[in-house]
Image (cartoon, rainbow, N blue to C red):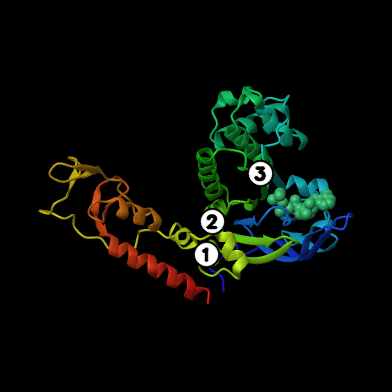
Amino acid sequence: MTLYSPGKGHLMIQFDTVHKRFPNGTTAVHDLTLDMPEGGVTVLVGSSGCGKTTTLRMINRMVEPTSGTIKVGGKDITRQDAAELRRSIGYVIQQAGLFPHRTVLDNIATVPLLLGHGRRKARARAAELLETVGLAPDAGRRYPHQLSGGQQQRVGVARALAADPPVLLMDEPFGAVDPVVRTQLQDELLRLQKELGKTIVFVTHDIDEAVRLGDRIAVFRVGGHLVQCATPAELLARPADDFVADFLGAERGLKLLSLKTLANVPQGPAPEGGTWSLVLDAADKPLRWAAKDTEIPVRPLTDNDSLLSALNESIASPTGLIARVDADGVLTGVSSRDDIHAHAGQAHSEARVVTA
Ligand SMILES: Nc1ncnc2c1ncn2[C@@H]1O[C@H](COP(=O)(O)OP(=O)(O)OP(=O)(O)O)[C@@H](O)[C@H]1O
């Protein structure tokens, strides 16, 4: 049983017993059967050399399988013209792979130009995409080396989106940037994906990135074996075997809490007359916890914040209470460490039961 129900109900990319053995005898992908639903993000994870990139590259026919069939949108890809197929599939790689001697705008306009759009139209589309990926218009006149690594990745994403392809393949796209920029790029991708609803196949080494971005996560092990494919919550609650459990890491219980929100945790009125009180501003927005001689900052949380953030805040809070606010930052109530704990436990048992 799966928690995932794809947006439009179609299986966009289907692997059926696909095998890839390179001429030197290396088996990169072993009898892979896997569906990647339309409009969802399927993340391929696993240690180095387990066949993730080969799997990805077989989708746009940069690598041909030794046996088995791959269908995109219900059609066997070997029956489609490779160049035409690639135009319907955007491809983003680590370090963006931009043309160094072309301006950013011309880099993004490459595919529209190839598709026969006039120069003006192609550049107008490129300028629009610059904005879509969160870059300032003047970035378009620069050359790739004049941008930061994170900005270059955004250009890479814009270029892949230029022909508005229904499918996007992303191979470690954020692997070469620092953790802060990486989180920003992940946020941007989630925002874009909400708007665009592409079918995305995303390769990463990073399990946190997979949990954050994936609607489904496929875990591979060396030899090109698929070990488990499940929603992040299913995977974290019920890893198929010790290999998957090890890959998810010792904190997989906490990672599961990062997927659950605070919305259903009960809240009550803020305490009055105790050692600590919650100080509000004139608009009822929480400012700090205050005792006789001490003040401690408060980080109020909304219903959309995760149970993990809530647990974290409740541990840091001198009262064990967290301050809850609405979308405008106005206090709605407080929740206790015990309530958060109880919900954390419930989230775990639900994840286990649903997938049983
Ligand atoms: N062209 C090739 N010829 C021979 N072997 C290859 C070729 N391309 C990849 N391989 C081998 O196939 C296996 C899978 O490689 P692949 O690049 O798909 O793994 P990966 O999971 O993407 O690894 P990484 O995370 O390190 O990028 C590896 O053993 C690799 O050395």
Report which residue position mark 2 lands on: 211
Give how far across and how far down residue 268 sits, in percent: 21, 60
- Residue found 68% across the figure and 26% down from its top: 120
Q: Is residue 268 above or below residue 292?
A: below
- Residue found 53% across the figure and 73% down from its top: 355
Q: Amino acid at mark 2?
A: Val
Q: Amino acid at mark 3?
A: Asp
Which disc is residue 18 wearing? none
Q: Is residue 137 above or below residue 354?
A: above
**Sequence-first disc among 3 and 1:** 3
Give the alpha-carbon distance from disc 1 to disc 2, as whole Å: 9 Å
Q: Quadrant of the N terminus?
A: bottom right
**Sequence-first disc among 2 and 3:** 3
Left or right of 43 in this view: 79: right
Dot 2 falls on a residue whose secondary structure is helix
Are the residues at dot 1 and dot 2 in contact (C-beta closer than 8 Å)? yes
- Residue found 69% across the figure and 61% down from its top: 221
Dot 1 falls on a residue whose secondary structure is helix
Are the residues at dot 3 and dot 1 in contact (C-beta closer than 8 Å)? no
Closer to viewer: mark 3 or mark 1: 1
Report which residue position mark 1 lands on: 236
- What crowding class fits label 1: few (fewer than 14 Cα within 10 Å), some (14-19), or many (20 or more)? many
